[in-house]
Amino acid sequence: MCLVLKVARAGFYGWVHCPVSAGEKHNQRLLELIRNSYALSGGVYGYRRVHCDLREVGEACSRNRVAKIMQQNRIRDVHCYKIPRGTRGRSALIAPNRVQREFTVVKPNGYYL
């Protein structure tokens, strides 16, 4: 069967005896820590702040690894944007005419014809 699939026998038997790799076990442990940090933040923290929390605990992992694990498990941060508010209730501000000039046009000048 190994000849048909073109894989080494040692790799096949290694997969049979240990289907979950050491890296995957480490990712599962990190996922629990990430979920705890995310829950304590109230679902607000993104991967940068979660990574800082993991480093405070003493966990050594990269920021990209935390981002990848969060993305695979659909853990997302909350984006808060300011709501644009209109200017209702305010009067229009018009500068007073202090020079007292009347700018009336009798005829258009030749530049714009």
Image (cartoon, grey):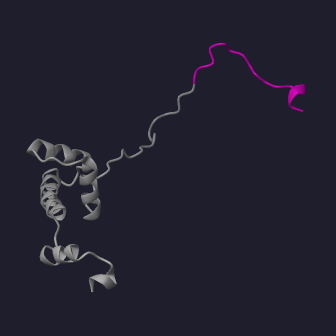
Image label count: 0
- Residue 107 picture quarter: top right
Segment colored magenta: 95-113
What is the residue that sits farthest to the left in this orientation?
57
Q: Main secondary structure of the magenta part?
A: loop
From the viewer's side, name the closer residue of 104 and 112.
112
Q: Is residue 40 magenta?
A: no
From the viewer's side, name the closer residue of 68 and 87.
68
- Residue 33 picture quarter: bottom left
Task: Tell me if residue 46 can be seen.
Answer: no
Quadrant, the C terminus: top right
Q: In this view, does 44 lie above or below 3?
A: above
Residue 89: image location, x then y, percent: 44, 39
Q: Is residue 81 above or below residue 9?
A: above
Image point (15%, 46%), residue name? 60
Image point (15%, 63%), residue name? 22
Image point (25%, 53%), residue name? 65
Task: Tell me if residue 26 can be seen.
Answer: yes
Quadrant, the N terminus: bottom left
Q: Is residue 9 above or below residue 47?
A: below
- Residue 71 picture quarter: bottom left
What is the residue that sits farthest to the top in this orientation?
99
- Image side of residue 57 versus residue 38, left or right: left
Residue 55: image location, x then y, percent: 14, 43
From the viewer's side, name the closer residue of 49 and 68.
68
Residue 18: image location, x then y, percent: 13, 73
Q: Does the magenta stretch include residue 111?
A: yes
- Image side of residue 113 versus residue 19, left or right: right
